[in-house]
Image (tube, rainbow, N blue to C red):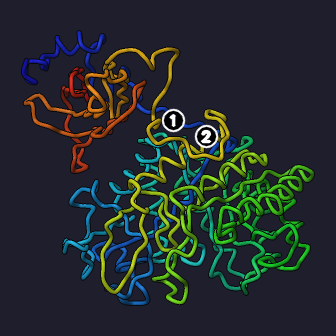
């Protein structure tokens, strides 16, 4: 039977296919296709920091290669990031040629702009696919004016669209770094604008905790010569909590690692502890503190556990920061390349295991897109440009490794998988055991929801290979075809174990373009089995 003969194109047949009348996008029968995260609590959540600060010369904000260039120059030997993003899924309108940057095979290397809505929405798609709850969107208080304000507002709106399409939550985080004496008032003004003009806290995807919208203020109490004062920070927290119109917030504060003991990276001022007692959530910055797995374990005993005890005794909540590794050689050439190795995910996983075991109920993941300091968890390439600038990579692991790993960490936090020092086998990604289904036969289930917009989940069952078939039967392809039999997208093309699997199709083709409304055929194929299902996309 041909692919075309499997497709049904008439409206009457579509009604049979879906079991309900076909309606337009505005029809009330069109189902929501995404399981949305709860926005009522941070408990049980992993929230990523989202910088969103990357720009290219063609952006309307006219900031050039912002956060890519070193100083005023962007060229091999003059850049400020250590990881190169994987651009293979990006559409042509998302790919910007990086001048002079070529891979080992001589191919042009490309970069993205956070001003491009399609790219930011794609990032939220990845969060949804791998089980990451949401983000703290960074707003740099020293730049919330002029082109900087335009830039951050655009990124915020892009994130709101992405969160809406893929059911993720978001909250605003103000980074006070760079503010001068008396300038914390700029945060108050910006928050008032977001509440009044953007109606940010009325967004259904804005993250709440204990019945109040969450807002984070990062950079309180560091001993690195900041000009704004602790008194200003205390006033800002009071405003966000108690102002009659703009207050009523759950305030999370980003503080130094040694906030509790008032030493090392923290100022020696008891007012810092007073501020921590006033804040709702205390989140110490751990990036660059532990260097090795043994360091993580020692850090848990000497810092995390006592922090948790302090917060419990003072009625505060605790949000520890985890990070996958660290490298900022291109920004600071005196610092060694790959300063804190990722150890193929073991460094990050140990932090999850240790902090959860210590009693952490929520976790801040640094960072989703921070390639400057090499802490990014989004897709990065193992084939970066070569030449005067050197880049670290993912040690040969798939570019989605850290998205997957963070999703697994979130599952461990919620006790959906056992607490373990060992990273779960990657083959179990999106594999669900349902009773004895793991040993049942080959099957492709009907996608859900159907009809759908913009995405749908496709689940399928793989049997164990027979002795005669050997391991070859575990290689699986799952492809989408249009009504003319043309390949639209490849969702799976790899060896997989027996059991129940699921994957989400986002309604895009292989070039990242939205496909039009219509009937599509999903085809699951192994060495000896083929099965198909018809699906209806309604834009």
The one nearer the camera, 230 or 478, is: 478
Secondary structure state at the residue bearing disc 1: loop
The one nearer the camera, 248 or 420, is: 420
Q: Residue at x 23, y 27 (%)?
A: 525
Determine if residue 246 is in view.
Answer: yes
Q: Is residue 254 left or right of residue 21?
A: right
Instruction: Give the number of the disc on residue 36.
Output: 1
Residue 100: image quadrant is bottom left
Instruction: Give the number of the disc on residue 141.
Output: none
Quadrant (top left, top right, bottom left, bottom right) of the C terminus: top left
Can you say whether 210 is above or below 68 in the image?
above
x, y percent for residue 313: 92, 51
Q: Is residue 2 left or right of residue 435?
A: left
Q: Residue at x 62, y 66 (%)?
A: 174
x, y percent for residue 219: 70, 72
Residue 474: image quadrant is top left
Q: Which residue is mark 2?
A: 39
At label 2, counting other C-alpha atoms closer than 10 Å, the crowd grade (few under 14, some 14-19, many 20 or more) is many
x, y percent for residue 348: 59, 57
């Amino acid at each position: 039977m041909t692919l075309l003969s499997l497709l049904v194109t008439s409206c009457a047949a579509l009604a049979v296919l879906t079991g309900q009348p076909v309606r337009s996008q505005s029809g009330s029968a069109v189902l929501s296709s995404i399981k949305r995260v709860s926005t009522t609590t941070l408990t049980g959540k992993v929230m990523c920091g989202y910088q969103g600060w990357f720009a290219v010369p063609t952006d309307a904000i006219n900031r050039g290669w912002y956060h890519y260039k070193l100083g005023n120059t962007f060229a091999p030997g003059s850049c400020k990031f250590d990881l190169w993003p994987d651009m293979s899924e990006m559409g042509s309108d998302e790919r910007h040629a990086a001048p002079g940057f070529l891979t080992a095979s001589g191919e042009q290397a490309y970069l993205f702009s956070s001003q491009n809505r399609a790219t930011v929405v794609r990032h939220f798609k990845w969060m949804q696919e791998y089980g990451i709850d949401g983000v703290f969107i960074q707003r740099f208080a020293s730049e919330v004016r002029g082109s900087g304000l335009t830039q951050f507002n655009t990124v915020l709106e892009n994130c709101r669209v992405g969160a809406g399409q893929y059911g993720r939550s978001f909250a605003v985080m103000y980074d006070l770094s760079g503010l001068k004496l008396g300038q914390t008032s700029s945060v108050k003004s910006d928050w008032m604008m977001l509440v009044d003009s953007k109606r940010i806290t009325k967004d259904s995807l804005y993250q709440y905790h204990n019945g109040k919208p969450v807002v984070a203020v990062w950079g309180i109490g560091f001993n690195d010569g900041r000009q704004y004062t602790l008194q200003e920070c205390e006033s800002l927290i009071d405003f966000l909590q108690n102002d009659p119109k703009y207050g009523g917030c759950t305030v999370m504060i980003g503080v130094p690692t040694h906030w509790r003991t008032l030493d090392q990276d923290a100022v020696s001022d008891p007012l810092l502890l007073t501020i921590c007692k006033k804040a709702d959530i205390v989140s110490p910055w751990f990036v660059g503190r532990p260097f090795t797995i043994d360091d993580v374990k020692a850090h848990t005993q000497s810092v995390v556990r006592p922090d948790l005890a302090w917060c419990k005794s003072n009625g505060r909540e605790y949000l520890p920061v985890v990070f996958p590794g660290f490298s900022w050689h291109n920004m600071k050439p005196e610092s060694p390349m790959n300063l804190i190795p990722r150890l193929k995910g073991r460094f990050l996983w140990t932090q999850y295991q240790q902090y959860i075991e210590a009693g952490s109920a929520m976790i801040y993941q640094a960072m989703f897109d921070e390639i400057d300091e090499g802490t990014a968890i989004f897709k990065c390439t193992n084939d970066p440009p070569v030449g005067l600038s050197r880049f670290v990579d993912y040690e040969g692991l798939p570019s989605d490794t850290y998205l997957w790993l963070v999703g697994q960490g979130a599952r461990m936090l919620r006790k959906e998988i056992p607490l373990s020092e060992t990273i779960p086998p990657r083959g179990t990604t999106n594999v669900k055991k349902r009773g004895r289904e793991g040993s049942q036969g080959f099957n492709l289930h009907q996608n859900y929801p159907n009809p759908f917009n913009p995405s749908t989940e496709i689940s399928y069952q793989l049997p164990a290979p027979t002795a005669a078939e050997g391991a070859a039967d575990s290689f699986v392809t799952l492809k989408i075809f249009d009504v003319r039999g043309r390949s639209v997208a490849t969702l799976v093309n790899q060896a997989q174990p027996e059991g129940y699997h699921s994957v989400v199709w986002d309604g895009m083709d292989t070039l990242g373009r939205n496909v039009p409304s219509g009937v599509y055929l999903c085809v699951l194929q192994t060495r000896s089995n083929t099965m198909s299902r018809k699906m209806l996309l309604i834009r």
